[in-house]
Structure formats: C-alpha cells, structure tokens
Amino acid sequence: MAKIHMILQGKGGVGKSLIAAILAQYKVSKGQNPVCIDTDPVNATFTGFKALNAQRLQIMNGDEINSRNFDSLVELIASATDDVIIDNGASSFVPLSHYLLSNHVPSLLQEMGHELIVHTVITGSQAMDDTINGFAQLIAHFTSETTFVIWLNPYWGVIEHEGKSFEQMKVYTSNKARVSAIVKIPDLKEETYGRDLSDMLQDRLTFDEAIVNPSLTIMTRQRLKIVKTQLFDQLNSVAVL
C-alpha cells in the first residue's frame, strides 16, 4: 500500500510547493524513494528541484486545462509501491478537486489499497480567510476515507482571528476528528533564517544540497540545518506519514 500525499489549496503563493519539497526530502531522509509529481500548469516549482526527480504531468490542451489528462495521474498512482507526493497549483485546484470528487477517486484509491492524505496550508494576514475557506471546502467535499494534514505558514503574518489561534477557530474545532496532524512552519526572521530559506528555494536546492554547499557561508548552512531539524522533528511525530 502506498500513501498518496496531495497538496491542495485554492490560494496561490502560500507555500504548496515548499510543503511538497519538504515532504519529499523527509521521505528520502527515511530511506524511501517517493514518486514526486507536479501538476501545476503555470509554475512547475516542484519539478525545479532536480534532486527530487519530480515529473511534470501535462494537463493543458493549448491554453485550457483538460481534466481528462488527470487520468494519467491515476495511472501513475495505481501502480505505485512507494509513497506519492503530488504538488498542485492554484490554477488547477478547482479542476483537480472536481475530477477527484466526480470520479470518486478517493474511494477508488482505497479499493487499490492506497491511502489518500490531503495536505493543505493555512497562512496569516490577508490570505488567511482564503486559505481557511479553502480548507473548509476540502473538508466538506472529501469523504471520511481522506485524511488531512494542516500546515500553518506564518510567512505572511500571524495566524489568528479575534485573538484565537487556528486551533481555537471553529473551522478546526468542528473538523478536528478529520485532521491527523498540524505542522507549524517556523516563523523565520527575514534578515537571517528567512533570507537563507528563500535563497535556497529560489535556487531549487534541497536542505542537504545547501548544507554541504561550500559557496554558502558557515552560518547560512547552520541556520538551514536548524530549520530542517525543526521541520523534520515535527514530521517524526506525524503518524500518518
């Protein structure tokens, strides 16, 4: 049985590809060989990480998304023996979600012996409402055979509403039973940690590649090592992984 990790969120620019890359690197660190697939038709960021061997799934016919092309995704998943990590862009969120639900793909995967895990991201500031609504839509439409993992990304601002943290918000407390884990991306200071991580992602480097890169300063590599440890320590506690 393979675990199918799908990153879904209708809001763009909130860190979906970052999550996909972190998951893939974590799996590799555990001696696994995950199948990495990028379905973003606009920004194939995940594919840019050469060390992760992510393959790009072509879902466009001319200038339009052809939902039938998602059949190829199911074929790739069906024969998988290793875990699969799928990064999906904001522009294909609605077509892919509709395809998965209208074709009863979650139950089909279960029949195949696979487990579907949807990872979604919540961020702060102006994008918070959009990401919370995105999570609410996913939880409402996907049936109980789908497990959810929430990633909290404070890059754009503190994730709270009227003094309540995400864990205190109704959208979470009402759906807590469906959520396997919450992963908190560290609140990184722009001048040091944040800048180092941003540069690493811009260069499409994995943590391991950056940490041994002699062109980076000693302290840059040290800070990236700390961030990696903070993230991976949390993932070690996520039973569904």
Image (cartoon, grey):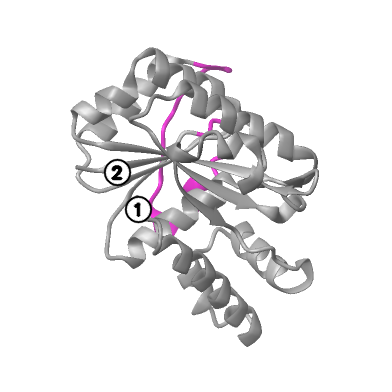
Q: Amino acid at mark 2?
A: Lys
Q: Outermost residue toward the bottom?
A: 218
Q: Which circle's residue, 1 or 2, is located before the other in the chain?
A: 2
Taking the image as shown, residue 116 lies to the left or right of residue 197, namely left
Q: Nearer the viewer, residue 215 or 82?
A: 82
What kind of residue is marked 1?
Leu
Label of residue 3 in the image: 2
Q: Residue at x 50, y 40 (%)?
A: 176
Tell me residue 174's x, y (percent): 55, 33
* Residues in magenta, as a range: 40-65
Query: 228 and 215: which one is in front?
Result: 228
Residue 106, compared with residue 122, is above or below; it is: above
For mark 1, give the secondary structure: loop
47 versus 194 height, above or below: above
The answer to whether residue 177 shows anywhere in this view is: yes
Q: Residue 6 at x, y = what percent?
A: 43, 38
- Mark 2 element type: strand
- What residue do we see at 52% from left, 77% from top? 211
**Residue at 35% from the left image edge and 59% from the top image edge:** 27
Q: Which mark is residue 72?
A: none
Crowding at mark 1 (Cα within 10 Å: few <14, some 14-19, many 20+): some
Q: Is residue 45 magenta?
A: yes
Is residue 42 something that shows in the picture? no
Are the residues tagged 1 and 2 within 8 Å (C-beta)? yes
The vertical placement of 208 against 44, above or below, is: below
Per the image, the residue denoted by label 1 is 241
Tell me the quarter of the image containing the N terminus: top left
